[in-house]
Amino acid sequence: MRVRYATAVRWLAFGTYDVHRHPRVGVLIEGLRAAGDEVVEVNVPLALDTAGRVAMLRQPWRLPKLAWLLGRCWTLLAVRARRAPAADAVLVGYLGHFDVRLARRLFRRTPIVLDHLISAAGTARDRSLTDSGGGGLKSKLMRWIDRGALSSADVVVVDTDEHLAALPASAAPRGVVAPVGAGQQWFAARPAARPSGPRALKVIFVGLFTPLHGTSYLGSALAELADDERIEVTMVGKGQDYEACRAAAAGNPRVTWVDWVTASELPGVVAAHDVSLGIFGTTDKAQNVVPTKVFQGAAAGCAIVTSDTAPQRRTLGDDALFVPPGSASELASVLRSLASDPALLADYQGRAAARADDQFAAATVVEPIRARVGSTSTSTQPPAMQETR
């Protein structure tokens, strides 16, 4: 007797993830389904966004609230997991550092895939929550959280080669790189044609104003553009460096500040602009990521302007405009060039859209994950195994 494995995989998407706040897991689920897999969701969103979790790290006395919220979600997850159909693999969504531990207890014989898009320790360092030397209590706590999460997973998904290299030696063999990608709604929002004739260059930034984003430098660039009537900028979001960014750009009357846009409306809002801005920070984390906004902006048909880092160069090739991290003057200069040259703008819009079509769609993004789970399944004998003669 020999065995073969069914092409389609039955997945259980599990955890407290929130696809509206963190679209990455939604892209993975969309991609798995587009590839022909079956995906059942067992999801109880945690009523706490990334900023709220970070606030608890700054104020440890609030951690009991996190434990209470998480315990309530886990109770519901456990009940629903028992009712769910048998799965070949379990996908634990983004920010699942704790959820993956529960998944390991509930699905002892099923391959578990952890979307480890960010590490707790890396995020804490980026947001200046821990000491620079990494020997303090908070640093040790963050590393403990990461170690426990990684040890609970059979496959660890990261988004860049740099993050793969940063995995501890014990987890590295289980790592696989899958870019962030963009959901179908971003491709659908792309306009069939852009308005012609003389008009202002419309630029948009969307983010949480973290050090990773480098919005302090962006604010300085906006100040340099204060006298240029050809460039209009929309800044969407609020966060850690928001006030400093807004203060720096206060002299520019052509900047519109929007606190937030709903997930359903955001693709259309971004697609209505000519240029989508990426990140410009100089932190260690900023050197190792390709932000979600880059994939989404490209899918929406915008020209992409972002920092010149190895992972972004590798992901975007020659299909984006790059500036040195932290350089406000270079960023302002690139935007002036695009405002001066409609043909250049149209060229980079077309390049970004073509690269998104080729590499950033959800079904393409999940290919490395499906391949790795297929190889993992051969040793775990999942329910999808079929007998042939």
Image (cartoon, rainbow, N blue to C red):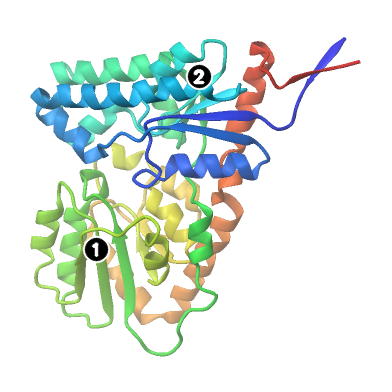
Q: Quadrant of the N terminus?
A: top right
Tell me residue 6's x, y (percent): 75, 27
**Cβ atoms under marks 1 and 2 closer than 8 Å:** no
Tell me residue 70's x, y (percent): 28, 25
Q: Which residue is mark 1?
A: 235
* Near-viewer residue (9 or 132): 9
Residue drawn at 45 percent across, 18 percent down: 103
Q: Secondary structure at mark 1?
A: strand
| Horizontal side, residue 19 vs residue 108: left or right | left
Quarter of the rendering containing residue 254: bottom left
Q: How many marks?
A: 2
Residue drawn at 43 percent across, 14 percent down: 152
Q: CA distance from mark 1 to mark 2?
A: 44 Å
The crowd level at tag 2 (other Cα within 10 Å; few <14, some 14-19, many 20+) is: few
Q: Which residue is mark 2?
A: 82
Residue 65 visible to the viewer: yes
Q: Is residue 153 above or below residue 297?
A: above
Q: Is residue 30 above or below residue 233?
A: above
